[in-house]
């Protein structure tokens, strides 16, 4: 297959986003990054304070992360909005 045909085929599969959908995706990325940062902080704290790690406190933080991920799941789907 010639390179030009391969490129045309790949370009035909490419989806574009509207500006609104791109902004939703940027916000989702920011939120996931924040959740990841919180997870890293919890892991660092648990590793530093292994003996003092209160299971209840760690579980409370994990529940907060679960809620944050649930909120992210309710964001609009950019691929669906772009259609």
Image: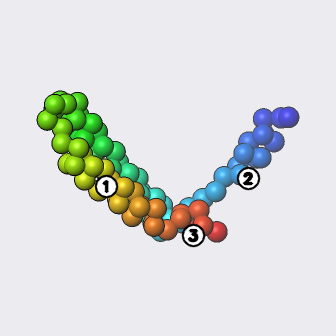
Q: In the image, residue 51 lies at what x, y percent?
A: 16, 31
Q: Which of marks 3 and 1 is nearer the N terminus?
A: 1
In the image, is residue 4 above or below residue 20?
above
Residue topped by disc 1:
63
Residue topped by disc 2:
12
Q: How many C-alpha atoms fall within 10 Å of the one at disc 3: few (<14), some, or many (≥20)?
A: few
Q: Which of marks 1 and 2 is nearer the N terminus?
A: 2
Q: How many C-alpha atoms fall within 10 Å of the one at disc 1: few (<14), some, or many (≥20)?
A: few
What secondary structure is marked by label 3? helix
Q: In the image, residue 78 lies at what x, y percent?
A: 54, 63
In the image, is residue 10 above or below residue 69?
above
In the image, is residue 82 above or below residue 4?
below
**Residue at image location 39% in from the left, 57% down from the top:** 69
Quadrant including the N terminus: top right
The CA span between labels 1 and 2 is 42 Å
What secondary structure is marked by label 1? helix
Residue topped by disc 3:
81
**Residue at image location 22% in from the left, 35% down from the top:** 46
Q: How many C-alpha atoms fall within 10 Å of the one at disc 2: few (<14), some, or many (≥20)?
A: few
Mark 3 vs mark 1, foreground winner is 1
Mark 1 vs mark 2, foreground winner is 1
């Amino acid at each position: 297959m010639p390179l030009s045909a391969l490129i045309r085929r790949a370009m035909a599969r490419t989806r574009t986003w509207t500006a609104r959908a791109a902004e939703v995706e940027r916000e989702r990325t920011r939120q996931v990054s924040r959740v990841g940062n919180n997870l890293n902080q919890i892991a660092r704290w648990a590793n530093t304070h292994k003996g003092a790690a209160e299971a209840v406190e760690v579980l409370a933080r994990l529940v907060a992360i679960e809620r944050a991920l649930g909120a992210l799941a309710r964001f609009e789907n950019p691929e669906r909005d772009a259609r």
